[in-house]
Image: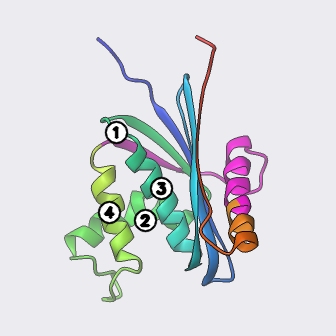
Amino acid sequence: MNKKETIIIYTDGGCRGNPGLGAWGAILKTSKYRLEIGESSEYTTNNKMELSAALFAIKKVKYTSNIELYSDSSYLVQGMNKWINNWVKNGWIKSDKKDVENKDIWQNLYKESKKHTIKFQWVKAHNGNKENEKVDEIVNILMDEHSSKGSVASLNNMTVSSAN
């Protein structure tokens, strides 16, 4: 039996002002590949950037896979692990009878996540986790670049491991 390798994803989103200038970043890893992606946004919220990081990272996975997705956003992790099935069942209405915030992103994230087996896991921010720190750095670099050039900054960088 050919068992597929699990894809490891780290995501982060951030804002300077909430709402304000923001960016999202993600790292996708296998034993052979590492992909770093991200993009800035002129006027957004932290939650939108956290969700966008997960959405765009998952969309990069083109074949059905087992994924472990790590995020320091309890909003994202609890949303995917605890809340989303009730939102879907209730027509994207929360228990307080209000619409789910960022519904468009949640709907796309839900659709994309159904293509895979994904374990969403929370990781504490700024606590020495190397990949979480790196994805946070990506977000801040993209916001800095956006600020300095006055337009959207993006990243799409793949490296291939020579180790077998």
The residue at the point 69 percent across, 54 percent down is 138
The residue type indicated by label 2 comes to Gly
Q: Which residues are magenta?
A: 116-141
Q: Position of residue 46 (x, y in %)?
A: 59, 73
Q: Which disc is residue 62 wearing? A: 1
Of circles 2 and 1, which is in front?
1
Q: Which disc is residue 79 wearing? A: 2
Q: Assess whether mark 1 and mark 2 are in contact (beta carbons under 8 angstroms).
A: no
The residue at the point 68 percent across, 75 percent down is 150
Q: Quadrant of residue 41?
A: bottom right
The residue type indicated by label 1 comes to Lys
Tell me the SS state at disc 4: helix
Residue 162 appears anywhere in the view: yes
The residue type indicated by label 3 comes to Ala
Judging depth in this view, the residue of 118 and 109 nearest the camera is 109
Q: Which disc is residue 108 wearing? A: 4
The residue at the point 59 percent across, 78 percent down is 42
**Is residue 65 on the magenta stretch?**
no
Tell me the SS state at disc 1: loop
Q: Give the colour scheme shown.
A: rainbow
Image vertical order of residue 91 relative to residue 159, above or below: below
